[in-house]
Amino acid sequence: MTGPRFGVNIDHVATIRNARGGASPDPVRAALLAERSGADGITAHLREDRRHIGDADIEALMSALTVPLNFEMAATHEMQTIALRHRPRAVCIVPEKREERTTEGGLGVAQDGNRLTEFIAPLREAGCRVSMFIEADPVQIDASCQIGAPVIELHTGTFCEAHLAGDIDRRAREFDRLAEGVRIGTEAGLEVHLGHGLDFETARMVSAIPDVAELNIGHFLIGESVFIGLEEAMRRMRAAMEAGYAEGRAAT
């Protein structure tokens, strides 16, 4: 292994398309390009308000992709019905509020455990790998384990914000919190992913954390692709992830 798996989120190709209307740029075309460029999976978030990815995009992605689709969704009956119809390889349950610009934090699994246990059961029975998008909080990690989710994705947004702000002390605290979350999750038998707000530098840093199985990266990649193309942005991101992974192995 040369580092965590690389999941590419193509939501914001659809954001650009929807800003003008019409069919261009096509998120499915971006997903196929990412697949050819070495993505291990494609992530798409079908939001309640359909602000970027639409139902037809999910249909087309399921037909076109050969790598797994990671279907991000809120824990609603509508989204459960859509997921059960398509049966993507992976489903990630995320918190969602209409007024937010993007996902602002982790899901409160501990506060909603009974409902989420019932919610994910049919998804697991349908063969979907279910993950819970949570903070690196031992309480939420334990709750995710208790409800039967085999995978967790830890929210890296606060760590990335600290890095962007140049707050080295806060960044160090958040990094340690993520590393401890990965350790706790792995020891509990969960597969642990990381995602949200990652760029070349922060992806390199978190790739050094032992036992991280997957990084999911979207907005930064799509932004960089405006300047250097998606293939080159992916190449640089993969190189950053591999460098971080090597640094982590050398330190242990």
Image (spheres, helix red, strand yellow):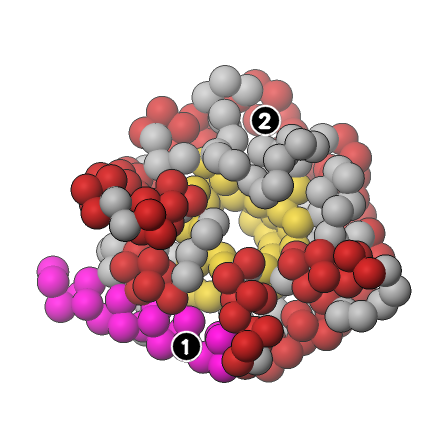
Image position of 131 (left or right of 32) = left
SS label for mark 2: helix
How would you classify the magenta stretch by its main secondary structure? helix
Q: Mark 2 highlights which residue?
A: 116
Q: Position of residue 95 (x, y in %)?
A: 58, 33
> In the figure, residue 246 lies in which quadrant?
bottom left
In this view, the mark in front (2 or 1):
1
Q: Quadrant of residue 34?
A: bottom right
Q: What residue type is labelled 1?
A: Arg
User: What amino acid is at disc 2?
Assistant: Leu
Residue 192 visible in the displayed image:
no
CA gap, disc 2 and disc 1: 37 Å
Figure disc tally: 2
x, y (%) of residue 46? Answer: 72, 47
Q: Does the magenta stretch include residue 39?
A: no
Q: Residues within 10 Å of mark 1 (few under 14, many from 20)?
A: some
Residue in the picture at 41% in, 77% down: 236
Residue farthest to the front?
165
| Rendered residue at 27%/66% (across/down) | 244
Image side of residue 235 versus residue 54, left or right: left
- Classed neighbour count for the residue bearing mark 2: other residues with Cα under 10 Å, few (<14), some (14–19), many (≥20): many
Residues at circles 2 and 1 in contact by the CB criterion of under 8 Å? no
Q: Mark 2 vs mark 1: which is more N-terminal? A: 2
Give the residues drawn in magenta, as a range.
232-252
Give whichever of 49, 249 is nearer the camera: 49
Q: Is residue 10 left or right of residue 17?
A: left
In the picture of the structure, the residue carrying the numbered disc 1 is 236
Please tell me whether mark 1 sits on a helix, a strand or a loop.
helix
The spot of residue 64 in percent (x, y) is 75, 71
